[in-house]
Image (cartoon, rainbow, N blue to C red):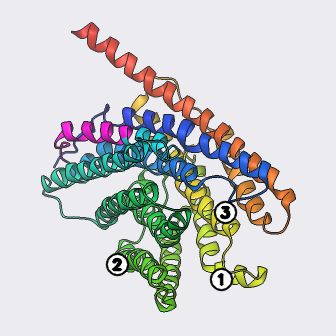
């Protein structure tokens, strides 16, 4: 069956919205929050509602928009079919963008009349966007006669986790903004915040990256083709680990039964072991001739994945060493290592590859992207190390605060170069279309 060319206009609106989201309510807001935390020398000095508003912009605006834009462009080509229901795909973009804005306003201002329902409406719009995205991909995949690949299994799992996370998020937001007392807010966070983030990070983002990387990285970077049998054997343990770490944690925290928390801990160990085995199977560190500009991003992302998973596994050891039952500093650093170090660097590398391929020869080249790579990786390293250090000395807070500025600067340089290429290509195509018309 001949290859089906991708729709060259499917991804720019998603990518450009993702860049706008992270440079406003996402990473930029997060950097401002971090500077405020540094000024107060306390990780709990900022409202959880502000932090959650920033987090949803990163999850849906940054990760979600790039996942959807890439999927609508690349997956039909993977499956050698045309994208089905393009109107629903456009609606998913509109709903997601609206949801991000509504929650960015509604969550921090939820105590003002009318803003609590606004936040819940935003979460509902995001769930509707995710459902439309899943439906479009299902309809598109069902039109292909090709047999499902191992890569397809990971992609399908990621989409399923995306829907599940969206449903949990609506419930979580409604309970948060509708809480009668501060104690109710704390209780909701204790039971549901971690499971929600695990669904979004380990379920959606990690599985989507695994599915795409094993299929595309060898073609893009000249690295060896992963062992499909090994990837297939790792699929079920990974999905069970995500399901158990989230469900068992919620049940354990909700009921106070420590056995369930132990089950969640074992599931996290399985997840870490299988994820590291999957990364090793990709063999991204094999020497290649003429490395692509994006290879440094995905290689660094793998390093950060291992660091984040090691921190996850070693959390009980760290708590025992510092003599505490929980550390905001350790868990915040761990989350940052996987969200910025693993997920964001992967997005930056993959998006640069996609934009460069589709923008040429109409648009300026995005360059080698060495400066944004250096800024984001340095910022991430500074954030992870200095946030952990705040458990030992208040002097680490200013350095942790400065890390966000470096990361946002890197994202801004990267985003500007990609946006310029996408917009230049769109203008060139429009001019050509008008000339030929």
Displayed quadrant of residue 308: bottom right
Give neighbour class at mark 3: few <14, some 14-19, many 20+ (Cα, 10 Å): many
Give the label on residue 219, or none: none
Residue shown at 41% from the left, 46% from the top: 119
Tell whether position 58 is magenta: no
Between 153 and 91, the residue placed more toward the observer is 91
Between 38 and 272, the residue placed more toward the observer is 38
Q: Secondary structure at mark 3?
A: helix
Identify residue for label 1: 316
Q: Estimate the spatial distance between the alpha carbons at disc 3 and disc 1, rounded to whole Å.
A: 15 Å
Displayed quadrant of residue 375: top right
Residue shown at 72% from the left, 46% from the top: 36
Looking at the image, is mark 2 or mark 1 earlier in the sequence?
A: 2
In this picture, which residue range is highlighted in magenta?
81-98
Looking at the image, is mark 2 or mark 3 earlier in the sequence?
A: 2
Q: Secondary structure at mark 1?
A: helix
Q: Is residue 429 above or below residue 43?
A: above
Q: Estimate the spatial distance between the alpha carbons at disc 2 and disc 3, rounded to whole Å.
A: 28 Å
Q: Secondary structure at mark 2?
A: helix
Q: Along the horizontal axis of the image, is 435 left or right of 354?
A: left
Tell whether position 84 is magenta: yes
Q: Along the horizontal axis of the image, is 417 left or right of 180?
A: right
Identify residue for label 3: 333
Q: Along the horizontal axis of the image, is 282 left or right of 234?
A: right
């Amino acid at each position: 069956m001949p290859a089906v060319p991708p729709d060259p206009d499917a991804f720019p609106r998603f990518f450009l919205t993702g860049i706008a989201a992270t440079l406003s309510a996402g990473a930029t807001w997060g950097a401002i929050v971090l500077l405020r935390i540094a000024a107060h020398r306390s990780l709990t000095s900022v409202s959880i509602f502000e932090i959650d508003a920033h987090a949803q912009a990163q999850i849906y605006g940054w990760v979600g928009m790039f996942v959807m834009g890439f999927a609508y462009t690349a997956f039909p080509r993977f499956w050698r079919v045309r994208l089905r229901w393009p109107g629903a795909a456009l609606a998913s973009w509109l709903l997601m963008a609206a949801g991000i804005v509504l929650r960015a306003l509604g969550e921090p201002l939820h105590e003002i009349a009318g803003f609590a329902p606004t936040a819940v409406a935003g979460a509902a719009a995001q769930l509707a966007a995710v459902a439309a995205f899943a439906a479009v991909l299902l309809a598109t995949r069902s039109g292909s006669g090709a047999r499902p690949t191992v890569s397809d299994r990971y992609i399908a799992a990621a989409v399923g986790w995306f829907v599940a996370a969206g449903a949990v998020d609506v419930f979580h937001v409604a309970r948060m903004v509708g809480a009668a007392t501060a104690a109710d807010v704390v209780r909701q966070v204790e039971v549901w915040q971690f499971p929600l983030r695990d669904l979004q990070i380990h379920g959606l983002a990690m599985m989507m990256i695994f599915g795409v990387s094993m299929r595309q990285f060898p073609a893009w970077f000249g690295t060896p083709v992963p062992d499909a049998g090994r990837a297939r054997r790792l699929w079920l343990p990974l999905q069970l680990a995500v399901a158990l770490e989230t469900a068992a944690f919620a049940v354990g925290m909700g009921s106070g039964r420590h056995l369930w928390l132990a089950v969640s801990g074992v599931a996290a160990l399985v997840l870490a072991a299988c994820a590291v085995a999957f990364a090793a199977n990709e063999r991204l560190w094999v020497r290649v001739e003429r490395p692509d500009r994006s290879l440094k991003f995905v290689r660094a992302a793998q390093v950060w994945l291992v660091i984040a998973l090691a921190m996850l596994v070693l959390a009980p050891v760290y708590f025992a060493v510092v003599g505490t039952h929980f550390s905001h500093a350790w868990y915040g650093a761990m989350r940052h290592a996987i969200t910025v170090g693993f997920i964001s660097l992967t997005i930056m590398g993959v998006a640069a590859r996609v934009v460069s391929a589709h923008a040429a020869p109409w648009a300026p080249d995005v360059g080698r992207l060495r400066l944004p790579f250096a800024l984001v990786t340095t910022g991430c390293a500074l954030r992870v190390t200095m946030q952990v250090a705040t458990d030992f000395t208040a002097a680490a807070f200013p350095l942790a605060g400065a890390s966000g500025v470096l990361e946002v600067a890197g994202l801004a340089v990267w985003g500007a170069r990609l946006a310029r290429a996408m917009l230049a290509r769109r203008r060139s195509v429009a001019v050509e279309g008008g000339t030929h018309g």
